[in-house]
Image: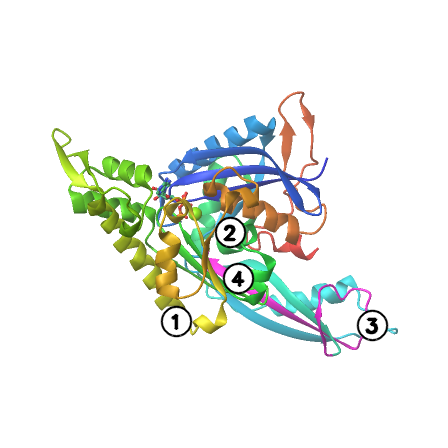
Amino acid sequence: MGQVIVGIDIGTSKVCTLIGQVVRDNHIEILGEGIEFCNGVKKGVIVDIESTANSIRSSVRQAGMAAGLSVASAYVNIPPVNVSIINRKNLISISGRDHEITVRDKERVLYEAVDIEIPEDRQIIDIIPIQYIVDGCDGIVDPVGMVGTNLEVEVDVITGKTTSVQNILKSMERAGLRVDGLVLEPLASGEAVLTADEKEMGVILIDIGGGVTDVSFFKHGRLMFCQSIPVGGDHITNDIAVGLRIPFNEADKLKKQYELALTSLIKNDQEIVVSEISESGKKKVKISEFVEIVEARVHEIFAISHRMLTDANISGNDYAGVVLSGAGICYVDGGSQLAEEVFKIPVRVANCRHIGISKIECATAAGILKYVAANIKEGNAECEVKSIKPVKTVKPTFGERFAARFVNILKKIF
Ligand SMILES: Nc1ncnc2c1ncn2[C@@H]1O[C@H](COP(=O)(O)OP(=O)(O)OP(=O)(O)O)[C@@H](O)[C@H]1O
Ligand SMILES: [Mg+2]
């Protein structure tokens, strides 16, 4: 049995847990899935630990029941709110008699590279070695065993707000689970929905969730930029409710029933009967009346995303396409046309069948599994799970290596 990895996506609308097993070539077979409504997260940030913990507990229980496993530890996403990517380089001399690079040399060059001053309210959440350079020869993935006099490393250090990290750890602890590592959400989503070619050539990933839209830019196989906009699918619902003066639930029902973001796609603009704000009366509205509202908000989200990228000096020449993800946009027709209007380049919508999941809501959790399987050293990635019946340990206990401050870094390096 391959190693079992558990990924939990704590989102504004829901908590999604996936239990996967690495079968071959980092291919993951999903053993269990659990989705639970979440009320404790606002705009991607945990605001109610108890409520978030309840959602985590329930979603993990559902996934565990499906897989026949009880889960004790998992990897969790961290949203790109207040996250920074710091690119660092470090060079050391190789002093051994035969100048052969050892594991210790690799550890030392990395540790010195990430030994940086960071503000007190921030902490390192991940480090991503980009490349090693031995005597000027670059693009080396693993320098151990090579011969050289100078070893250089280029690394991306990802830092986040300590309070955000601590609230994730606390919610997991309250749910009775240990954290094996944190995975930055765009890295997870990118792993799930983008191709290696897209990431190499340059691509923008726009993930519209319930409370936030994450905008990320990948190029040369790396995450170069990510930022969150505090607007998501729930704001579309709110706009419909306010614009038509109807209850929020009714607006949500309309949005999910018609799944349209472009008035030009309406085939038959008939009148439909909706509840009034008081819920006591009914009134008629045209389909185009509410689709116009959706269209305006979705267009605005893309316009803000585009402006944010331009402000960060990322222009249309830097990327070859845009990929849309997140349940806030993937279900609605017309989303890609609106994005194409704003970005003026080809846009595609993430396809959950290609990822091997049943719902796009699970894309981030699926990405966590893929990211962990691809980036954490062989045998080190597995989570602690036990077979529910018969009682037998399926995986050896793991998790003691978890260090609250550096989370999964130790696992990646050693
Ligand atoms: N069929 C549908 N049509 C339109 N919108 C939908 C549909 N199903 C879900 N949504 C919307 O998708 C949004 C939730 O998306 P998603 O599950 O990706 O968010 P999340 O990951 O929980 O939140 P976030 O990423 O913002 O923290 C909600 O606004 C919901 O109303
Ligand atoms: Mg999300």
Q: Say which residue appears at 11% left-offset and 30% top-offset.
A: 281
Disc 3 C-beta below 8 A from ligand 2: no
Q: Which residue is painted at 58% across and 65% down in the image?
A: 200
Q: Residue beneath label 1, please?
A: 310
Residue 294 location (% of width, % of height): 27, 49
Identify the residue under disc 2.
189
The earlier-in-sequence mark between 2 and 1 is 2
Foreground: disc 2 or disc 3: 2
Image location (x, y in percent) of residue 307: 35, 68
Tell me if residue 72 comes above or below residue 317 in the rendering: above
What's the residue type where badge 4 is placed? Ile
Q: Secondary structure at mark 2?
A: helix
Q: Rounded to the nearest whole Å, what is the CA distance between mark 1 and mark 3? A: 43 Å
Q: Earlier in the sequence, mark 2 or mark 3?
A: 3
State which image quarter holds ligand 1. top left
Residue type marked 2: Ser
